[in-house]
Amino acid sequence: MEILKGINIVKTYNNEINDSSQNIINGLDITIHEGEFTAIMGPSGSGKTTLLNILSGIDKPTIGEVNIMGMDMVALNDSERAIFRRKNLGLIFQNFNLLEDLTLKENAALPLLMQGEKQAKIEQAVNELFKLMNIYEIKDKYPNMVSQGQRQRAASCRALATNPRIIFADEPTGNLDSKAAKKFMNYMRIINSEKKVTLLLATHDSMAASYCSRVIFIKDGNIFADIYKKEEDKKFLNKILDCLVIMGGDD
Ligand SMILES: Nc1ncnc2c1ncn2[C@@H]1O[C@H](COP(=O)(O)OP(=O)(O)OP(=O)(O)O)[C@@H](O)[C@H]1O
Ligand SMILES: [Mg+2]
């Protein structure tokens, strides 16, 4: 079943220095099916973040349609989109965005508190997620007392707390060393398979992308290649690296 669809997406930015405009995304079509675990790859500046922001309703396309779970995102105004996002989507960023004055558990509970959920339900939901992500033992620590990888997993618990059907992540392993990144991607895989959450992430990191079941490469404002995993991680990683070489750019 289709869960996310972008049709003929164009995003134009104006360059004030030389008074020109450029289509960063240029007529791109994309369909994501429920349960898919997809990475978007491409050279720096190719528009990965721009595309992710449009597909998650953070930003609007200049032209084109975005449909998330049957909802026409372009027809909604900014605050309606924000409400839709809060209710239905989970977002994970490179820099974690945890509040330093709250414990990991309090951070993860925040979206549920804001929704007015009962304490017992919050407690149960957050504890389950912390166990799943293997950070239950450190749930009462503050962000500055734990590792980067543990912070990112706590941020993921927060994104998952509201039971979103889709999680969007922009460079989620960008601040992690390779060991922590592998561990993190393994948990993403567990979330995808056990909680049936659809995951879409933008990444520079081919190792991280090799954990996904589909990789979409973007270049010059459009899709350059779209590959599905049929093999083990290592072989898929080689395929990804081959695509990056053929595509060129700075990756
Ligand atoms: N608000 C904006 N105004 C003007 N240009 C922008 C704006 N946001 C992004 N751009 C430009 O759009 C292009 C794509 O940016 P984007 O951040 O989507 O790339 P990216 O693929 O995520 O890069 P990176 O891998 O470095 O994160 C870049 O050339 C960038 O300078
Ligand atoms: Mg980016």
Image (cartoon, grey):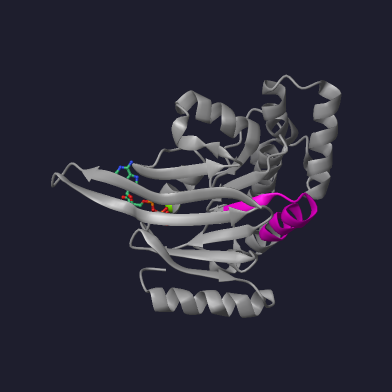
Q: Which residue sits at x=54%, y=55%?
A: 31
Residues 80 and 202: in front is 80
For residue 191: magenta?
yes
Residue 58, image x, y percentages: 48, 37
Spot occupied by residue 251 in the image (x, y as percentages of width and height) = 42, 68
Principal secondary structure, stretch drawn in magenta:
helix
**Relative to 235, is 129 on the left or the right?**
right
- Residue 139 position, x and y percent, is 78, 38
- Residue 99 shows in the view: no
Q: Is residue 240 visible?
A: yes
**Image position of 123 with respect to 245: above or below:** above
> What span is colored magenta in the figure?
185-200
Q: Is residue 128 above or below residue 76?
A: below
Write down the quadrant of residue 142 in the picture: top right
**Residue positioned 63% across, 64% down in the render:** 212
Left or right of 15: which side holds 249?
A: right
Indicate whether 57 appears above or below 123: below
Q: Residue at x 48, y 29 (%)?
A: 76
Image coordinates for residue 236, horizontal then vertical, percent: 61, 76
21 inside magenta stretch: no
Q: What is the count of numbered marks?
A: 0
